[in-house]
Image: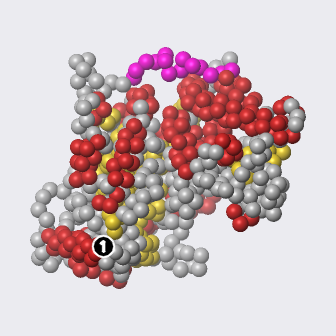
Amino acid sequence: MAKRKRERVTTHNALTSTDAGSHKRTKKRDENSEECHQCRNNTARHVDCSSCKKRYCVRCIKKWYSNLIEDHVKNRCPCCHNNCNCMDCLQSDIMHKIDKWNVSHEDRIKFAHRTIYFLLPWLKKLHEDQIQEKRIQAIIDGITECEVKVSRTELPSDARCYCNYCRTCIVDLYRGCECGHYDLCLSCCQELRDGSLVKKDKKLRAKPNGSILCPPKAAGGCRCRGHALKLKGIFKENFISDLLEKTNSVVDKRMLEEGGSKCFCLTKSGEINTNTSRQAACRKNPIDNYIYCPTAKDVQSGALEHFQEHWLKGEPVIVCDVLGSTSGLSWEPTVMHRGLRKKKNKNGDQRLTVEAIECLTGCEVGINICRFFEGYSYGAVGPEDLPIGLKLKDWPPHSTFGEELPRHDAEFRSALPFREYTDPICGPLNLAVRLPKDVKKPDLGPKTYIAYGFAQELGIGDSLTYLHCDVADAVNVLVHTHGTKLKIQRLTAIEKRKDSLLNEERTRNLQASPDHSDVGIKVDVSLIKPEPKDDGLPFVEGDQPEGGALWDIFRREDVGILEEYLTAHAGEFRNNSELVKQVTDPIHDHCFYLTKEHKRKLKEQYGVEPWTFEQKLGEAVFIPTGCPHQVRNLKSCTKVALDFVSPENFEECIKYTNKIRELPNNHMVNEDKLEVKKIAIHALRHAVDYIIG
């Protein structure tokens, strides 16, 4: 095979004519004006940049670029460094430049083989299931298997096909009614026949010959009630069998054996290399207690195989100082807000109010964005002198991160380590990027999470993310923190509130009343006030934590024991101040947070301990799918997270999808949003085509 030229991969957006015109106008205005480039004021003393001739007033330098001195600006101003945070620059694509990186043809071949290696077992199982369903159809029709004809479903390219029973994505063959209103995946068909259907439904039944009748309309069916569901398909005839044949012809079973171990966490003397590892647990196995923790410079120098060694084991990874390789654009929430492109709603009104989650009750409250950011910096107080924690989840809402914050999107992507996996546009080991352009894609981010935080573990009202598993792999970068101290009066109010809750619960138990809708405190947003700065009240003594967020990540092999513990002790946990009363699935219910005491009991009684560590500013945390985790904010934090699908953890994504099938239809996790089976088909096809050439 002829050797191909090295391919250049670039992830910066093309400059639109509108942006270019805007840039020219701004440049011309700067050259002919004595105004400050930042605030457009000409009354304060200015510093002229010797490189690009722009000027910044000393007030703006002090307010928005406190890390710079006047001589720095005179030599090369923020515009020269591509980190100017004036409104014009923040909202323009002209500075949306990410450093180019190369992926050689040899590496692309290696990555394609890696993809095939991990996805091939699933493809074989899918093919076997389809062959089995065709055999059953042959028995139903009284013909040979070769004579079975599958009705092809013409779907729009952006349409999604879901099983009406288990709500998971249908990837190719399935059974559906004639009118197209009821579809059943092959897994449900097979389970229905052998009596192992995850959720029993007497109205959905199979005949002795294997045919399945469409259920009545009242049970989610349609007017085809009583008619047998037909065998249908999405791809062309024999697509899966042809893909399997091609894949088998190129698979390299030696792919993971040739290199051997690439992990250098142990020194020659057998000790842990603490330069690239961080202790996060105290289990019996000393190696298992450490997390691989390289710096961003280590990653740039070539640490991919070392990362893969740990990633393959299902271990989290921490990369330090990822912001050091970026342009230095400010992640201050107020700067991000100024950079929003769409500050008005559909009616043309200013979007001054945001929906925040109040941590005491878990309720959404509408609050002025300026008041929210004030609380972020100084703290907030609610009724009864209680400290108030607020969280903005997935901000800005109703649009993609890149559309509303193009400069910060570029900054985040340039900070991503191991871009072979994490690049959302062209990462060769990010399976999700292989979906065709005309196929509707899952929302994998980036997403911003802005929240208040407290150094102390309060017990109620903590700013946290409950224990959960992500649908895919994730990388979470802490881009900004602001430490706020609690006053003693706030802790006293928390203790009073906890005593009050206990008394209410005892009274309710004595009255044998199941109603607990009045438990907790209703927070009126108008009663939330900024923490007074000069009221003379003493603060809680003690140093501020170095990190901004406390993480607990559990091993996959401990999930069963963890679920057992949570189910047995469910009545001891609080979800938004109220005791947990009902458990459907301890992990996917998103209602448990293990405090220090619960983590101690879990280790003492069951021998299970998570990796526990503080995420520091500029650190990227990689979380493999299948690992339950929880987070508590120790400071006011701004995090940006991105999901991706790696070949190594593809099977864990399948397990997550299968778990969805078992949950009740009204459960909060009730949809196959990732559609990982569809992703796998396109990733395999791309890998095979690239190898074959």
Q: Is residue 490 above or below residue 56?
A: below
User: Is the magenta region chiefly helix, strand or loop?
Assistant: loop
Tell me the residue at 30%/27% (across/down): 265
479 vs 262, nearest the viewer = 262
> How far from the left and from the top, in percent, is residue 44?
31, 71
Residue 62, image x and y in percent?
28, 63
Q: Can residue 199 be found in the magenta stretch?
A: no
Q: Inspect this view and state whether residue 648 appears.
A: yes
Three-letter residue code for mark 1? Asn
- Magenta span of residues: 249-262
Visible residue check, residue 479? no
Q: Position of residue 629 (x, y in %)?
A: 38, 49
Find numbered disc 1 in the image and state the secondary structure of the residue it sits on: helix
Question: Which colour style is shown?
Answer: secondary structure
- Please give the name of the residue rendered at 51% of the width and 40% of the height, measured from the top-left corner: 652
- Quadrant of the rendering where the C terminus is positioned: top right
Which residue shows up at 45% across the image and 31% down it?
312
200 displayed left or right of 545:
right
Q: Where on the picture, by quarter, is residue 613?
A: top left
Task: Look at mark 1 in the image and give the residue it sits on.
Answer: 509
Instruction: Depth check: give the residue in front, 517 or 25.
Output: 517
Please check the rendered image and state whether residue 253 is part of the magenta-colored stretch, yes or no: yes
The correct choice, above or below, for 370 with respect to 675 in the image is below
> Image quadrant of residue 610?
top left
Nearer-the-camera pick, 287 or 11:
287
